[in-house]
Amino acid sequence: MECVGRISQLSAHILAEQHRTSCFIVMIRQRWARIIRWDRAGAVVTRAFDYKATPHLFEFLWRYKHANAMDRGVDTSHTTATQGEEAAFKEAVENHLRVQIFDGLITPEEQGSFREYVTEHYEPGNVTKLAVCDERSKIIQHYLVSKPTSLPEYAIGMSTRGYWAAKSNLNGDGWEITFLKDTWRDDEDGAVKEGTRYELLTANCAQNVPTVCGHGNVRQRDSADTFPCLGDTFDNANALFSGQKTVTQNYVTADWSARAGRKVMLKAYTHYRLVLEQAAVTLNDFKDSRELFTAVRDVIDALRSARDIQLLHRDISPINILLFRKARGERRYGLLANWDVSSTTNDCGLANDTSSTGTWPFLSVKAARGLPGFRHTLQDDTQSLLYVLLYCCMTLLPHADVNNLGLEVADFFDEINSGVLLRRRGLTKKSWIHDFHFAETSIESYHFEEGVERFLKAFFKVLYDLYFQEPRSYLTLPYEASDFDWAIKKLAQVFDDILGNPTSFVDLKTDKWLSGLQKYREKLVYAAHDLLQSNLSKKRSLMDDLDIDECGSSCDSLEMPTLPERKKLRYGISGLISPA
């Protein structure tokens, strides 16, 4: 199992750091070898063969050397930028940061911080030009990117990377910074593209939602390894261009597959790029408590706007809330981004998509419970938004030294206590809300500033009133759309009443707690992970399928192991601690 884990990490690193559609790995143990082909759907592994007695390895290496770039797994929709384009990209990033972070004015004391922000988006000698096939205009556009704001942790799945991207403006006399999302979307029939969701929101004048500039499946020339030219046109019937799709799922039922005849489900993925007009920073970069609370208030308007067109976000988390300044001298607005798992609703406000989704630490009580028949509602999104705000207050705002801060954060958000996995599936949040545990025993001991303390007390009262005391509880059926409208309006009123005091929120953000909290929570999570691993080792492992220790087994077409609890643990750390 350890060997499989190392191979998975290696392939994840290759696919994350390079612009590739797939990669090959040769695994050698003594005189035995295997060849593995990875893409975002999974891996195909050959039969173990004696590479000294057979020509298979030599033949593979010869074929790989003479194959074109596409067959080697290179994404031919990218190319290296020129020196002039790299210089223009760096200048554009610096100008954009001056507005977004420093409001146009950088003091000598802030020069060091400014350079750090630049290095988050620009790496010298590593500027790439990506082609985006805009499905609206049917024209290929070029964008310059460098250092991604985030990298995928796994070799399989959506493998999302985000970039600040530069595009020449319409006049051709400068460069504009946008946001480019490079991902592998679900290729199932009927799956709605994220860009289509943004177009729907924009067409209905939704508030505080990013604007889409272009989006579409990534296409490449079939006839040559050439980079698509700027301004080239394409359509679905154009034989010169084809999409980039995973192929591993096609071999599950092949006659030679050891998995043939067994029930194996692999998702198909299609390479997809989305460009948004607003290149912003995440909620974790708020300046002071007023900006934090105002940004969350802006997101409430975004949720209400989406509700008006029967759309739910379903994944409220700190990394999905952005801060964007439209122009110098203006305040930064909160934007709600990443609508890739959003769902339409019926007339009663229930999500039509019944699949479970979201970021574990911020799931609503009912979403975390995951009971049969659960369907997401607007109240689940608003509850998640309040948990995001609570987390930011506890970890990023100044308050008194509280000895059990790490314990309370881990207990409430991760449901992990004393190194023991206590996935109570939302019951911890429910008990805190129902019993006023945090509101009555802990808020005053934190000694937050007056406005923050007032809001946090009101915060738990609102949760209690909305989810346990309202006449028509959202925990029971039937639903009525008016219930959700009433809940979001009441929440907005609480924000407006407290934000109405101009002196309530003045404290600056602090990073005092993050380092210690990260170490404490990682210790708890890894201890729980070790416990989970010991239980998993008692079950039939993937090693039994590969038979790596006895390299004489038959060929496998395999899907990577799905370990929901293990994934949730890792997601819990990255979703809360990572500044990206």
Image (cartoon, rainbow, N blue to C red):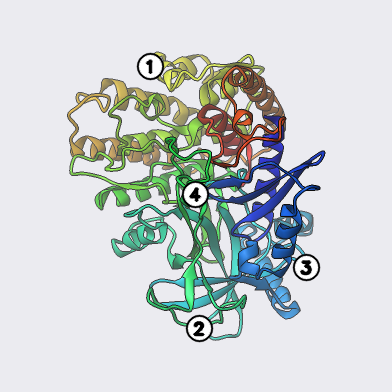
The mark closer to the camera, 2 or 4, is 4
Spatial separation of the CA atoms under disc 1 and disc 4: 51 Å
Residue bearing mark 1: 434
Residue of label 4: 251
Looking at the image, tell me whether mark 1 or mark 4 is earlier in sequence order: 4
Q: Are marks 3 and 2 in contact (CB under 8 Å)?
A: no
Q: Residues within 10 Å of mark 1 (few under 14, many from 20)?
A: some
The N terminus, quarter of image = top right
Q: Is residue 391 left or right of residue 483?
A: right
The residues tagged by marks 2 and 1 sit, at their Cα atoms, a distance apart of: 59 Å
For disc 2, the marked residue is: 231
Q: Is residue 440 above or below residue 500?
A: above
Instruction: Give the number of the disc on residue 245.
Output: none
N-terminal of the pair, mark 2 or mark 1, is 2
Residue 139 appears anywhere in the view = yes
Contact (Cβ within 8 Å) of mark 2 with mark 4: no
226 or 406: nearer the eye?
A: 226
Task: Estimate the x, y position of residue 358 in percent, counting from the top left.
Answer: 44, 38
Is 160 on the left or on the right of 462, as rendered? right
Q: Secondary structure at mark 1?
A: helix
Question: On the image, numbered disc 3 is attached to which residue?
Answer: 125
> Looking at the picture, which amino acid does disc 1 mark?
His
Q: Position of residue 337 (x, y in %)?
A: 46, 52
Q: Within the image, what quadrant is residue 539 found in? A: top right
Q: Residues within 10 Å of mark 3 (few under 14, many from 20)?
A: few
